[in-house]
Amino acid sequence: MARGYRERVEYDMHRLAWHAANVMNVHLKKKVTVKKLLGQDRNMSREEKERHFNRLIRSRKG
């Protein structure tokens, strides 16, 4: 059941990102893609992920 729920949520997010990209691209010079909106275009190294995570943790404490 959990896998089915996760797949359904991913499908819904993809569909929502597709709709948002279509609406946004009418008004933007630089085009937005579904992958960019979903964050799938970013290729972060492990060190970058750890730095980003630590920065988020510090911002919550401050």
Image (cartoon, rainbow, N blue to C red):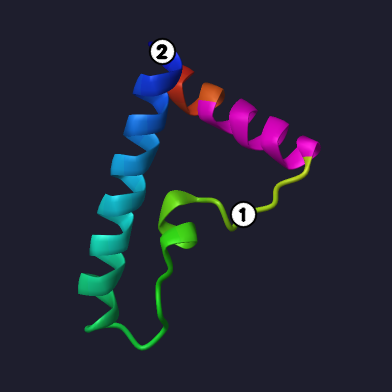
Q: Secondary structure at mark 2?
A: helix
Q: Amino acid at mark 1?
A: Arg
Magenta stretch holds residue 32: no
User: What residue do we see at 31% from left, 61% from top?
Assistant: 18
Crowdedness of circle 2 by 10 Å Cα count: few (<14), some, many (20+)?
A: few
Q: Secondary structure at mark 1?
A: loop
Magenta stretch holds residue 47: yes
User: What residue do we see at 32% from left, 56% from top?
Assistant: 17
Say which of 4 and 30 sits in front. 4
Q: Which residue is label 1 attached to?
A: 42
Residue 56 position, x and y percent, is: 52, 29
Q: Which of pointers 1 and 2 indicates the residue nearer the eye?
A: 2
Q: Which residue is label 2 attached to?
A: 2
Report how far apart the C-alphas of labels 1 and 2 lie in the structure: 26 Å
Main secondary structure of the magenta stretch: helix
Direction from residue 33 to residue 58 in the image, left or right = right
Say which of 20 and 59 sits in front. 20
Q: Amino acid at mark 2?
A: Ala
Question: Taking 3 as reference, is 24 above or below it?
Answer: below
Tell me the quadrant of the picture where the N terminus can be found: top left
Tell me the quadrant of the picture where the C terminus can be found: top left
User: What residue do we see at 33% from left, 31% from top?
Assistant: 8
Residue 61 position, x and y percent, is: 47, 17
Question: Taking 51 as reference, is 58 above or below it?
Answer: above
Identify the mark at residue 34; answer none if there is no mark.
none
Direction from residue 24 to residue 35 in the image, left or right = right
Residue 42 position, x and y percent, is: 62, 54
> Badges 1 and 2: C-beta atoms under 8 Å apart?
no
Say which of 35 and 11 sits in front. 11
